[in-house]
Image (cartoon, rainbow, N blue to C red):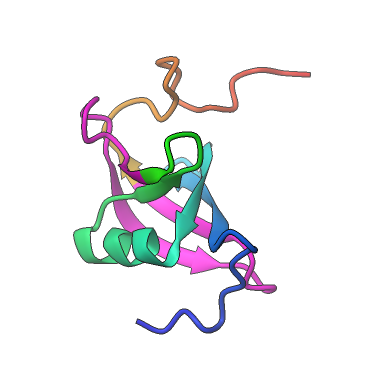
Amino acid sequence: MDFSQLKFNEAGLVPCIVQDADTLEVLMMAWMSAKTLRLTLEMGETVFWSRSRQEVWHKGATSGNTQKLVEMRYDCDGDTLLALVHPAGPACHTGERSCFFRTL
């Protein structure tokens, strides 16, 4: 897979916004490396890089709250990904459907 259009940061990561493919609700943001992007595309489920644990993180592997990939897009600058998914449960570790449940 050719990711030459993508601009990974100095840590080799690119942000990925995850959106429900049906409702278009923004569910979460997480980081992807070239490896986790490749795994996501191969597996058809989201796989991220956990900066806090410094390891590959298959979303829902332990909770069951997986995200089936419908389509992967990238923005005009090539520095942000958008994953359109069918979620199998809440995206947030708090149990909320979306990580964006709080208002400022």
x and y percentages locating residue 50 in the rendered image: 44, 41
Indicate left or right for 66 with 16 as reference: left
Picture mark count: 0
Could you say where residue 93 lies in the image, as x and y percent from the top left?
Answer: 42, 21
Q: Is residue 79 above or below residue 89?
A: below
Query: Quick check: 73 above or below 86?
Result: below
Residue at image position (45%, 15%) is 94
* Viewer can see residue 25: no
Which quadrant does the N terminus fall into? bottom left
Position of 21 relative to 89 (above/below):
below
Instruction: Please provide percent x and percent y for residue 20.
Output: 43, 43
Residue 90: image quadrant is: top left
Q: Indicate whether residue 103 is drawn in magenta.
A: no
Q: 19 or 37, which lies in front?
A: 37
Q: Which quarter of the figure is the C terminus placed in?
A: top right
Q: Quadrant of residue 83?
A: bottom left
In the displayed image of the protein, which residue is found farthest to the right?
104
Percent across and percent down for residue 23 are 46, 40
Residue ID at (67%, 73%): 76
- The residue stretch that appears in magenta: 56-85
Asked if residue 57 shows in the view, the reply is yes
Is 58 contained in the magenta span?
A: yes
